[in-house]
Each structure stands twice: as C-alpha cells, then as structure tokens.
Image (cartoon, coloured by chain):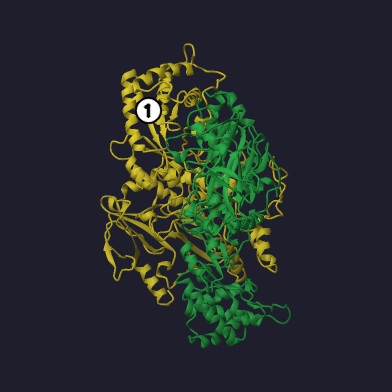
Chain colours: A yellow, B green
Amino acid sequence: MAAEQDPEARAAARPLLTDLYQATMALGYWRAGRARDAAEFELFFRRCPFGGAFALAAGLRDCVRFLRAFRLRDAGSPPSARRAPHARQKPPPMADVQFLASVLPPDTDPAFFEHLRALDCSEVTVRALPEGSLAFPGVPLLQVSGPLLVVQLLETPLLCLVSYASLVATNAARLRLIAGPEKRLLEMGLRRAQGPDGGLTASTYSYLGGFDSSSNVLAGQLRGVPVAGTLAHSFVTSFSGSEVPPDPMLAPAAGEGPGVDLAAKAQVWLEQVCAHLGLGVQEPHPGERAAFVAYALAFPRAFQGLLDTYSVWRSGLPNFLAVALALGELGYRAVGVRLDSGDLLQQAQEIRKVFRAAAAQFQVPWLESVLIVVSNNIDEEALARLAQEGSEVNVIGIGTSVVTCPQQPSLGGVYKLVAVGGQPRMKLTEDPEKQTLPGSKAAFRLLGSDGSPLMDMLQLAEEPVPQAGQELRVWPPGAQEPCTVRPAQVEPLLRLCLQQGQLCEPLPSLAESRALAQLSLSRLSPEHRRLRSPAQYQVVLSERLQALVNSLCAGQSP
Amino acid sequence: MAAEQDPEARAAARPLLTDLYQATMALGYWRAGRARDAAEFELFFRRCPFGGAFALAAGLRDCVRFLRAFRLRDAGSPPSARRAPHARQKPPPMADVQFLASVLPPDTDPAFFEHLRALDCSEVTVRALPEGSLAFPGVPLLQVSGPLLVVQLLETPLLCLVSYASLVATNAARLRLIAGPEKRLLEMGLRRAQGPDGGLTASTYSYLGGFDSSSNVLAGQLRGVPVAGTLAHSFVTSFSGSEVPPDPMLAPAAGEGPGVDLAAKAQVWLEQVCAHLGLGVQEPHPGERAAFVAYALAFPRAFQGLLDTYSVWRSGLPNFLAVALALGELGYRAVGVRLDSGDLLQQAQEIRKVFRAAAAQFQVPWLESVLIVVSNNIDEEALARLAQEGSEVNVIGIGTSVVTCPQQPSLGGVYKLVAVGGQPRMKLTEDPEKQTLPGSKAAFRLLGSDGSPLMDMLQLAEEPVPQAGQELRVWPPGAQEPCTVRPAQVEPLLRLCLQQGQLCEPLPSLAESRALAQLSLSRLSPEHRRLRSPAQYQVVLSERLQALVNSLCAGQSP
C-alpha cells in the first residue's frame, strides 16, 4: 500500500497544522534576519492533571511522524492526475505556501516564501522523555532545537500532538490503577471523541496508558491496538423473531457429525431454562432470541449476549442461556454477556449466581466462568465500585470518561523558548506561575535505594552528570535555601530522538511503551501514586540553574 | 491539487472509522440473510448540553463527505507507486477488508468479504437538520435509511462526526450570546484539542456557532474559516535588543519619500512616551522593543504588541507606544495590543485611558481606538465580566474552554434503529430514559405568531403535514393526556440531503450555516435562550405516534 493510501502518513503531512501567529512570527523572524538563529524550545506542563501527582509522557511517535514529513507544499509541485471517486466539485484548498501568502500582507517579500518552500526539519534535533515515562511539572517532555523560524513554527503542532496524548494516557493509567491488574479495560469512546483523529489518538494512548483493548477498528488497523467488540441494541431490536435465516444449520465445533438447526435447538433449551428460572416460556422476547441465534451462527466460538434490550431477567438472561446451552451441545462455549444499564455491580453478582446454578443444573461447568462485561458511563467512582473485592465483573467498557477526560479535558502544555544563539532566555512576567526556566538543560530522575523515584532534577546541559551515591545540593521550587539529597541511583530522562532530522533509534512499539508505563507506575511510591491528595513529587533545580534564574530575574546578563 | 493531496478528502476516506461491534454485527446480519433488509436509523441526543435548553446541529458536511467517499479498500486495489518523501520503513497498515478479516473468525465465509468489497452508500438516503439549525432532545439530526448492514456500519462514524461538531457549535453559540454581538471572538484552542482533526473540527464548528475567526491555519486553508493571529511571548523573549536587522529601514505608508530606521525612530519616541508616563527611559525592556520593531517591520499595517512578557506598565505599554508612534509618523496605524495574564478587564480599562491620554498628548487620534485583545483561560464567567457594559476589551481569544467544552465534554448522541423491513422498532429497556421512539418519522417546528418556536413535533412519516392555524392534539413527553396547540407557522425540520447516495442540493457554505445559526438563535424566545435555568423546550408526539409507542410498550404489534 502506498504512502498516500495510509491515512496516518497523510494525516501527519499537514504542515499548516499551526496557529496563524506562528506564521506571522516566522515572517517577523525572517524580516529581522533571525530565521536561522540557533534556538531551543522546551515543551512541558505546569501542573499534573486530575489532581494527581504524576502524568505519563505520550505523543512522541506522532511528533516524529509529523517532523519527518514536515514540508510546505507549493502549488508548483506536480499535481497528481487521480481524483477520489466521489470527489466534490468544490475547489480544492490552496497549497500551503499560497495559503500563507493569502493571509500575510500582500507586499510581503517573495524571498520569504522562497525560504518557506525550502523548509523542513533536517536541521531539527529533538530530545524527549520516552513514551510511557512518568512526567512531572516543568520537566521537558520534548527539547526541540534548530533554526529559530522552523522550531517556532513547530510550537502548535507539537503541543497539539503531545498534550492530549499525554492527558488521555494519564487518564487511562488512573483508571487502570483503580481497576487493578485483573479487570479487563476496553476503551469504547470513538463516538464521544473530537472527530476521527480525536478518537484514534484516544484509543492509541488509552492503550498505552494501561487499557487492554479498544473497540476502535481504525486504531487496530493503523496502530496495532488490540480490538474487541460485542453487539449493540440495534442488532437486537432489528429482529422480530419471524426472520428465517438462509442457513439455520450449525456444524459441531469438532467439525464432525451433522449440523443442527440452532434456533430450534435454542427453543428446546429455552423450555428447560425457563423451568429452571421459574419463568413462563413466552416471557423471553422472540426477537432477542433470534438476534442471539443470528449472532451465534456468525460467531459460534465468540458468542456474546447483550442482555438489557428488553428485560435482563425476564428476557435477556434466559435467551442467552438457551442459545449458550444450544451452542454448548455442539461443543462451543459462549464467551460473555454485556450489561449496559441499571446497577451493573448488583446485576453482575446475581447473574454470576444464575450462571453457577445453571452450570450445576445442566452440568456445563464452563458456564460459571462466562465473562460479564459492563458499560454505561463508567467514571472513576463507578469503576472503583465495579472493581471492589468480590466483584463478578470481568470486563469494563469505558467510553466518555476515558476519551473526554471530563475531570480536566486539557493538559495545559506549553512550549517555551529557553535559549537562542546560545544565550539563555526566560519569560519574566509579573505572574510567577508563568515564568519559565532558562537555558539548555539536562534532566535526571533521582531514585531511592528501593528504586522508587525521589525527585527529578533539572540542571544546565553543560553541568557534569550527577553521580549515584553522591550528595547533591538542589533547590526545590520557591525555596529560600537549598536542600541536599543523596540518590541511590540516577537516571537521565531525555533521550536523543531526532538528530538533525534523522531518527536516532527505532521508536519502541506501542506495546513496549505500554509496558514501560506500567513498570514506571509500579516503581512510583504509593504516596505519589495515589489518585486523591497525593504527596507532590518535587522537581528541583541544580545550584547553577537556580543561580541563572536568580541572575536573570535580577536583570543581570548570565 | 489532486484529491489525495487534500487532507480533508483523505481524512474522510477512512471507512474503518468504526467500532468493532459494527463489523461483528455486519457479519451477524449477513449470516442471517438480512444484509439488504431496508432499515432506518435516527441520530439524536437525549439532553441539551451545558444545562441549556437548545443545541445547534452541526457536522453534516463531514458526514456527507464521509458517506460519499465510503468504500472499503481491498489489498487487490492497484497500489500507487509513489511514497511520501520521508516514509517510515514500518510495514504499511493492512487494507480495510484484510484488516477486518484478521479480526473476524478465521472460518468466516469468504462471500461476506465479497459483500464488503462491493459496499458503498449508493443506496443510502439521509434526511437531516440543516447545519446551524436549533436542535432539541429526541428530534433527529439525521435520519439514515438503506440496507441494514451498511446503515448499521455507519453508526459510529456518523456519531463521531456529528456529536462533537454539534457540541462545540453549541458551546460557541453560548459564548457568543454571553459576549453580545459587538465583541470579536477568536478561537485559539488547537493546542488543547484532541489532536489535529479535533482542532480542525473545533475551529470549523466554533466559527459556525458564532465565533468570528480562528488562529488555526488549517481551518482557514481547508474550511475557509477566517484566520487571525498575533504574536507569542517566545517572539518577544527571543530578542535581547542587541540584534541588528539586515534592513532596519521602513518606507512611508504612502510609498513616497525616503525610508527611516524604525528602531532609531522608536527610540526617539520612547523618551517622549516615558516622560509622558513618568517612567525612566531605561525601564522598558530593550529586547521587547526590538521584538516590536521586528514585528512592525514585517507587519507595518498590522502591528500588534503583546504587552505582558516582562511588565505591562513599565515595559510592554511604553514599548508599544514608542513603536506605534514611530509607525504613525510614517503614516501607519497600529492595530492592537494583547494581554495574556492578570486582571484583563481592569488592565483594559487602564490601557484605554493611557491610549486616550497619549492620543491627546501626541495628537494621534487613532491611538484611542487601538484594539485591546485579551486571552488567558477565559470561560463563560470570565467572558461575562469582560463583555460587561463599558468594557474596553475589543477582541477575546478563547482556547481551552471553547474547544474542550469543559462544562460537558461530550454530547451523548445516539443512533437508534427505528424501522426495519417497513416495521417500526423500539428499544423497550427497563431504563425509561433509554427507550426510543419507533417508526419512520417527520419532524416539524411549531411557531407562535411572533415567529418564535413554541415546540417541535414528531409524527409518523405517513401522517399529513400539520397546517398553520390548525389546532393540533399532541402528547408532551410523559404526559397522561394530550394538549392542544394552534401554531401560527409550521416549519418542516428535516431536509432530504442524500438520496440513494446522490447529493440532492449543494450544501450551504460554512458562512451561510453560521448565519443560519445566528438567525435561529435570535428567533428563540428569551426563556429558552437563556443559559442558566432556561425553560425547557418541548418536543411533543402526534397522537398516532404516541399510540404506536403505547402499543409497542404494551407488546402489541403495531
């Protein structure tokens, strides 16, 4: 498949994914003769989301894809002759360079557009926190250096690609911590996302953050996220019970012996099930049963029932049992039931009792362990209840509250200039919260003897690497005097990712980043990991970095 | 530009933008011989967002684009030979049909995939609320009819394309109602969106909902949204004041006469400005002034200053005035200043006073009306304060709180089967909130004599169209008996949009839809339009539709 058939590669190639002021500033730099000044920006956030004390770094793979494809298209590029089969007759959008020319002053020097035409990221170098790493306030997720004009243009795209990815990965990690390691978490929020790419990003980074799978097929196709799914109420309501399938016969699982009419077999089982449950055989909805039979004919090895279209107890459950037992007779095992309304925990407990009783009654032990899948606006609080000890719920489908991050729907990432022409730069606004940390920096994680992170330390890039076992004098934020720390281990945090536009090492797979996230979280001490009122994790400055901040605040040149 | 260079057209062509259970249900329908049963679905929401009593319908243009391009790609399709210049070496994603085969049971009948290969929307018919219309709970935004298998597959994509678009348009409309008609609203939330398409959708539909412009360049390029922008703090901090522009000269606005060194001219003005303001001439930051000069050289007719990088009063404002007055001497008029921190209203009032005093002092009347642009986490409450009577703020930039819709980050749209094989269908769950309204329906808006909407009415498609001036007996939701209404006007709500896959009329432009939204909102009565504790707008059922609901609830066939 060619690159232009790969929607991912195509989506990455949108160089005008930016704010207009990046483009106006580009012209400003160019007019000032500064387009090629060496500059360095840092992308970071100022507060951990959701009231927690940690975040997960994510979005790097999308940034790399964007940076490597970054090039402004020009109307002079040879157009392809092909058109999409149903292409609309509206005029195609202007090429990138022409569009910028249309929104910049008409008397802009044509040489500026010549500069834009030649622009790419071949002189851009990126250091980054690997995806799935723990990230803390003020520690760069990305350090981006290169010619001032181009690294300024990258501000909005990089923020756009990193902020939500990190937010949703962090949200997913919180949900995983609440659910514990055993419950399976299924992301199913595509329809609640900000359009198609919002959904793709959500599914990809929910998985990175700790979910097991997604219902989003595109995330499976393009990102390799494991996909899972079941059936919806419309499938059930589409059947009245009078439909006749073209082929009602199902062969046994072992593949030998004659097929049987599954609907007829289910009808026989229904009488036994209703007698067992004390229900009239007319009570279960015939359309629902027909739907279950149809689904079972298509998925005999993966039969699931959605129980709450009409009535869980009087219809969904007996119909499911009838079809599951009919399948069982042919050697197939039903895999699950889904509940999408009502008190999910309570129903799961009672359904498990019914399964156990029916397993004994009909001598089909596997029925005891049919998965119970629940969904319906599950948030952190509801999840905690569903994951409590003794819960019979096995799989939890979460849509809105993982994808939209309703507790805090944006991370508030920023991208700040820290050095230009080798000189440190700092924003000295009257709002201390919005001040920045100047200079090209290195970042380290200081670990205790038990391997758990104690604090992160930022220092100037040229300072010697701190050594394990050595006492360090460091400045906590806002402190009046330094404190000392003797880390048992020191981990450098930022890895060289792109050097002069070239990828330095293969990016880890999504599953590898997911494993790193779980490992990182497991090492975090409980007081930093807890989700409500956690102890704040400190990010401290080296003495030299603190001295630089002080000198710039005092208006001295460094 | 060819279609495959148009990211919009390409983004639309992602047929696997769906949940896995749509695909599993497709196989279920196919196996049951029901793939081509005539079916109708409705897309609607159950509650208006943000505690209001209205929503705006939006997203239709994206749906039309998706439906017209919808076709599953097969590995057998002729691949193009071209590759993107920096294409990664990782294997390309599987083609659509092959990917589905990889996640469905291995023994799935190959004839099912043959069916998928031929699938398109050429038998799909869509009726829709025009974009920018008022939408209310239970009234379909889309009615989608066609072969059961394909219209079921469209569930997730259509929900994904309509729900957030309508949500953000409604959010923007609320912000516009708060701001009043005079303040200019600039959307600047791309970096806070769920990735690139999230941002594009947000910018497009914020504009539709009533914003004036967006900073998102891609929304301008691809959707024709007016774009606007200014400069960021990094531009200011990148200058130390020691930089020498390659060409410091600026020609007069009239184009005649010799150019002048703008930096030198600004330096002269700075002394006068500082004397006027009672500041020392050393106080304003020289780097900030150099940045303003650089920006003014690039944008002499559109000069703006960002005032709060160092200190608004001691640096930003005097530097802005010095450069603006220097430009003024050459015949140019500065257009604006931006504030991004602190008490925005208070500062705007004081800055306007300074502008007025300086206009008088230096005899430049235009300085009085320089635009004051503000931004910094502005939500509904902050906006109400900035828009109060007497406010000197002119332009309000809003990012996070328009794009992420933090009050309610998802609309909760649903897509429900209402008829199959000509028979009405209804979900009769024990949760009354989740019941659906059966049957193929028509929808009307009943208007009072003042032209304001009284209520919406749903009836069966085959019922005669209600007439203006005629008394109607209708059932409000949950009522024990009908009530009567005599509308002065009756408007049909749903327009035929796609018939058997063919576009029935050109879609309105985005600007036309935006105008419709403002017109619709202006007609809504104040008690329905107010944003807090509004009167609920009723959606009533015709007597025949109510009778159908009753008969299905009672378990009778209709």
Query: Residue A281 in the image: x percent, y percent?
Result: 41, 20
* Residue A242 seen in render: yes
In the displayed structure image, the side of residue A487 where residue B49 appears, left or right: right
The residue lying at 49 percent from left, 30 percent from top is A236
**Chain of residue at mark 1:** A
Query: Residue B153 in the image: x percent, y percent?
Result: 56, 35
Q: Residues within 10 Å of mark 1 (few under 14, many from 20)?
A: some
Tell me the quarter of the picture where residue B499 sits. top right
The residue under label 1 is A370
In the displayed structure image, the side of residue A429 where residue B466 appears, left or right: right
Q: Nearer the viewer, residue B386 or A425?
A: B386
* Residue A162 seen in render: no
Q: Nearer the viewer, residue B422 or B319?
A: B422
Q: Residue furthest top?
A: A257
- Mark 1 falls on what kind of element? loop
The residue lying at 42 percent from left, 28 percent from top is A316
Query: Residue A324 in the image: x percent, y percent?
Result: 41, 22
The type of residue carrying mark 1 is Val
Q: Quadrant of the N terminus of chain A?
A: top right
Q: Nearer the viewer, residue B365 or A479?
A: B365
In the displayed structure image, the side of residue B403 where residue A16 appears, left or right: right
Whether residue B160 is situated above or below residue B190 in the rendered picture:
above
Q: Quadrant of the C terminus of chain A?
A: bottom left
Whether residue B40 is situated above or below residue A377 in the rendered picture:
above
Query: Residue B58 in the image: x percent, y percent?
Result: 59, 50
